[in-house]
Amino acid sequence: MRLLHTSDWHLGRSFHGVGMLDAQRGFVDQLVARVEELSVDIVLIAGDVYDRALPGVDVVGLLDDALVRLTGAGARVVLTSGNHDSAIRLGFASRLMERGGVHLRTRLAELDTPLMIPLGDQPEDDRSPALAIYGIPWLEPRLVADHFGVETASHFEVTRAATDRIRADLASRSTSRNVHSVVLAHTFASGGISSDSERDLSIGGVGAVPLDLFAGFSYTALGHLHGRQALSPEVRYSGSPLAYSFSEAQHQKGGWLIDVDESGVTSVEPVHWEAPRKLAVLRGTITELLESDHHAWAEDAYCQVTLTDAQRPAQAMERLRARFPDTLVLGFDPEGAPPSAKVSYSSRLAEAEDDLSVCCGFLEHVRGREPDDAERSVLAEALETVRLQGVSL
């Protein structure tokens, strides 16, 4: 039995204002190709299928297309809801979809109802080896604490209650047969490395849950963190298939390929997704960035640029985009800036000698660069026009 662990598709998300639906279609193409190439039996999607609770029509259409193509390639799909999804909407028609090989686990009542799959060549019966796949939907502590009967609405307590229910069901199925287990969960587990593109889960309780809550399961397929990582041999994040923040510029996107037989999990290997565009995080003076051959590789990348000029260059974004057309984020961190650049605006205002100094000081404060002679002249002319019209400043 071969499984492919994915999560955090975030269909419909944009990247600093750039739509990503075409890039997400490209990921689906890669996913279907790998399913066929590697003879994957089951695709796991551990939450955050959509980026928002009310996805657009074209976004829903992309998920529909993905599920049709994956099942058409011979794989079943097990899908849980994440904190970005609407569990009710995502779980619509789940019983009907199960007939087509798509198994949705978005309801609390179904988290301890596994998909049972026979293992080995023996005839299927109640004594043959099997794999049980459980899906824990996203658990918002404040909303589910009463359902689980826990006194404290925390991520730890509700996740412990959920995994306890799964263990109880697993124990009942293991009395007469050898049953291995895979659990999908969308949560922040202790030891995970986060990125800038993930939504904080700490509202409503302590965010991280300890790894020992997943002890005893053959494999735990986690979602939420966008970097692929192994917290232990049995507990892993697949990460998002695409980069959704510049903090992920160094990520190698992919998933995990898991092989299971009668003895349990026999191997876990990484699977890679090709990125549609490179990400570049650039830092330096505007002259160095525009002239150095060292940055030629970033000319066709999405760029985040931090300028270190002592004074903010004029028309910085326009000049940068002449070389790096897809500069999406521009920041300033002046090195060697004059002491005046660190003076608060209120202090600058208190020290102003006249109206022109107030205007020039404001301009310098908001853009990080002193006005030049031409700009000072324009400001002086405007102030004189106001004075002659008898307007009190």
Image (cartoon, helix red, strand yellow):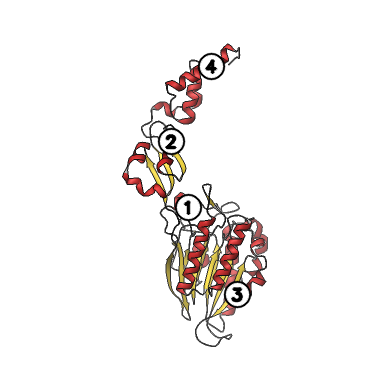
315 vs 234: above or below: above
Picture residue at 61% right of the left edge, 67% below the top: 105
Mark 1: give few (<14), some (14-19) or many (20+) Cα within 10 Å: some
Q: Residue under circle 2?
A: 316
Foreground mark, 4 or 3?
4
How far from the left and from the top, in percent, is residue 47? 56, 62
Query: Which structural element holds mark 1?
Result: loop
Earlier along the polypeptide chain: callout 1 or callout 4?
1
Q: CA distance from mark 1 to mark 4?
A: 49 Å
Earlier along the polypeptide chain: callout 4 or callout 2?
2
349 vs 47: above or below: above
* Residue 195 tag number: 1
Picture residue at 50% right of the left edge, 86% below the top: 121
Earlier along the polypeptide chain: callout 3 or callout 2?
3
Foreground mark, 2 or 1?
2
Query: Which structural element holds mark 2?
Result: helix
Q: CA distance from mark 4 to mark 3?
A: 79 Å
How far from the left and from the top, in percent, is residue 321? 43, 41
In front here: 10 or 176? 10
The kind of residue tagged 4 is Leu
* Residue 320 tag number: none
Residue 152 visible at all: no
Q: Quadrant of the C terminus?
A: top right
Q: Residue under circle 3?
A: 169
Query: Which structural element holds mark 3?
Result: helix
Q: Residue under circle 4?
A: 383
The kind of residue tagged 2 is Ala
Q: CA distance from mark 3 to mark 2?
A: 61 Å
